[in-house]
Image (cartoon, helix red, strand yellow):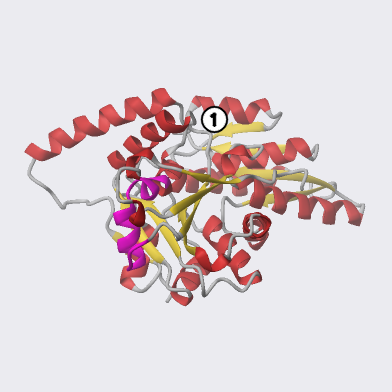
Amino acid sequence: MSIVYNKTPLLRQFFPAVSTKPSTSIPQFFLKYECLQPSGSFKSRGIGNLIMKNAIRIKKSGNKSPQVFSSSGGNAGFAAATASQRLSLPCTVVVPTATKQRMVEKIRATGANVIINGAHWKEADTYLKSSVMNSIDLNTTEPIYVHPFDNPDIWEGHSTMVDEIVDTLNEQNIALNKIKGIVCSVGGGGLYNGIIQGLEKHKLADKIPIVGVETKGCHVFNTSLKLGKQIEFSKITSIATSLGTASISSQTFEYAKKYHTRSVVVEDTDVIETCLKYTQDFNMVAEPACGASLHLAYNTNILENALGHKLSSDDIILVIACGGSSNTVQDLEETLVRLREKAKHERITPPTFINDPIQPVPILGRA
């Protein structure tokens, strides 16, 4: 148990949407409930680990005081603020102008200093590094910069959920060879990298396949795998903003090639409908980034196609319910209405490929 993150339950769940199918075709779904983290998402593990390790290192030197700096208007920024609160560290979070007021208020409620600057994450991050962090007194303060996903300390923190999964299954006398896959959402790849490293630690990385799920419009992981090289999107169009990174980490790309990770892309509308159904079925709110993975539990045919084989009632699928704090039920309902109206409009409007916002842009200097 850590001061910056919680040990979360791994629970078997029955999904009503698939319960009418023949029992021989329904795998057992176990959900890892990362929504029970201090910040409401898995980000507490990795970002908490990064902040705590660096704070300990800085305090041991005895010369300077640690101060946390984060650039994220979403779950990463909230996780940084929450961890800083638990460790009694000053924290500044720069959020882009598109950040929901609800998230700004939640971050501020931890005691963190919130600055609103930039139209999107990259601009907020640039402002944090060039203006905010450049103005601190380095003689007395040592900054702890918190990237949303691309840092080995973050991956190390996320890997602890695999330790917990293995411990829980062993306690319940469930054989690990019954696990036929792990489903997780993929944004920049921090969660995915952590899961891989956790599986490597337990010598399971080449035995348990991972199915990475993205929403269309931010499917940079899927596109990179298809093209065989890392790419960057010029614009993100999906409503799953927690998955909305323009690129993945280079480590994510290398792991995916090494372990033949499966990739699934789902539509925004399908994910929102799944989130609302999940709320109805389990009385819990899931944001779209989490709903992308839950969607496969409701649609085993997609999961089976990704894995390349049928699943039976003896098989176990682990779903990382990664959590998130950016959406309410009202947000989901309003988004679904907008998406359906947009779909109606698109059915009668001729398609255009001018300035297509999801055209992949190769990243120079990378394989």
Where residue 157 sits in the image (x, y, percent)? 67, 56
Position of residue 84 in the picture relative to residue 154 (left or right): right
Where residue 321 sits in the image (x, y, percent)? 51, 45
The answer to whether residue 39 is visible is yes
In depth, the one of 117 and 221 nearer the eye is 221
Determine the residue positioned at 39% across, 48% down: 297
- Main secondary structure type of the part rendered in magenta: helix
Position of residue 330 in the picture relative to residue 75 (left or right): left
In the rendered structure, which amino acid carries the disc numbered 1? Met
Q: Which residue is mark 1?
A: 103
Q: Is 295 colored magenta in this rendering?
A: yes
Quarter location, residue 271 = top left
Q: Quadrant of the C terminus?
A: bottom left
Where does the magenta region start and end? 294-311
Determine the residue positioned at 66% across, 37% down: 38
Where residue 149 sits in the image (x, y, percent)? 56, 54
In depth, the one of 38 and 18 nearer the eye is 18
Quarter location, residue 115 = top right
Q: Residue furthest front?
A: 23
Q: Residue furthest top?
A: 330
